[in-house]
Image (cartoon, helix red, strand yellow):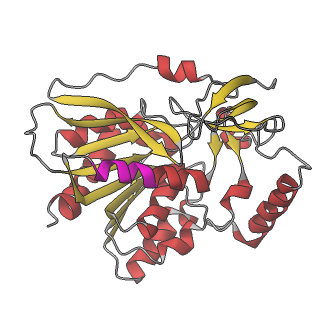
Amino acid sequence: MRAILFLVLIAAFHAHAVAQPSKSRAAAIAQNYPAIPESIQRRPVTIWSDGTRMAGDLYLPADMAPEAKLPAIVFIAGTGGTKKGTPARMASVFVQNGYAFLAFDYRGWGESDSKLQMLEDMPEPNENGDVTVKARAISWQMDFADQVEDIRNAIAFVSGSPNVDNERIGVLGTSYGGGLATWIAANDSRVRCAAVQVPGMGGGRGPAAERRGLNLQTKQARGEIEPVPYETGAPRGKMSSYAHMRYNTAKSIGYDVIKAAEKITIPMLIIDAENEELIDRTKNGEWVAGILESNGTPVKYHVLKGIQHYGVYKKKFDEAASMEVEWFNQFLKSAQ
């Protein structure tokens, strides 16, 4: 693919995404939202994550009292997911059941700005710290380290909302985002309840995968290969439909959801698909459910019958969403 370059004046944290492999930012902006009832309001919000602007949508009841404090759900997207897709559909379900709901695009995904990779030596900054550089937008990266930071900042944003009870924040993750949500459930004390559906948790990666990540990091650090995947790193095989995405396994070193699950103490719902074709659920959701159960952590593991991975967004959407609302009602909404 041809590198798309641009000149940018950047001061401290002003980094705007303008280019993405095979899938433009303009296409994400042009995507339509699903219709929502008049009883629900959607507020576009800006979330800062390590100096980069993320685009978000905060959903609230339209007739909410100014002093109201609602429990909040932060949605964590899966591979290639954006705030206008699955979370925009889920938002109505949750808001109608008395929740605030936050959806956002990771840095470099959807409508969010990207980090920048300079493609030439940096000139001396002027008196304001500004430099003019030739740079590339770092977009559509499968980057565990950055996305954990993005999720933490989304939680921080919603916890500061005047209409959110920051003692009642939950996370809801799907697919790739289900693994991220599980890691966050283990490591962020602000999260009081979690639910994940068809989660990819990286079960079974093992030492060989760790070595590959370390070897990749060595080559990136030494400039022997692309420092950030652009021409390389596209998903293949069962995930080839996400050709605009880029894996950077060097950024997943030390990211072990299965080990993280040992630390989870908050209630967690795990929903899997009976005919899951993308992952081995016995080494992902089912495995984590067993860990939580053995540790005495409140957990429910449910398998949706008769569907494959993507059936949770279609045929079984209502069933899954209903179970998730019920779970959060029990363990988050009623929490004091």
Q: Is residue 164 visible?
A: yes
Q: Position of residue 232 (x, y in %)?
A: 81, 40
Q: Residue at x 48, y 16 (%)?
A: 30
Q: Position of residue 200 (x, y in %)?
A: 55, 55
In reply to whether residue 248 is colored magenta, the answer given is no
Residue at the extreme front of the image, as rendered: 127
Decide if residue 164 is on the left or right side of residue 103. left
Q: Residue at x 55, y 18 (%)?
A: 26
Q: Quadrant of the C terminus?
A: bottom left
Decide if residue 290 is on the left or right side of residue 96. right
Decide if residue 209 is on the left or right side of residue 146. right
Please tell me which residue lies in front, 190 or 284: 190
Decide if residue 257 is on the left or right side of residue 21. left
Residue at the extreme bottom of the image, as rendered: 295
Total marks in image: 0
Q: Position of residue 218 (x, y in %)?
A: 85, 60
Which image quarter: residue 93?
top left
Q: Is residue 249 above or below residue 135?
A: below
Please tell me which residue lies in front, 160 or 81: 160
Q: Is residue 302 above or below residue 137?
A: below
Please tell me which residue lies in front, 309 or 65: 65
Q: Position of residue 314 (x, y in %)?
A: 40, 35
Which image quarter: residue 104?
top left
Q: Residue at x 57, y 24 (%)?
A: 25
Tell me which secondary structure the magenta stretch mostly adopts: helix
Q: Is residue 79 above or below residue 43?
A: below
Q: Is residue 316 visible?
A: no
In reply to whether residue 157 is colored magenta, the answer given is yes
Q: Quadrant of the N terminus?
A: top right
Please tell me which residue lies in front, 155 or 93: 155
Extent of the magenta region = 152-160
Q: Residue at x 82, y 57 (%)?
A: 216
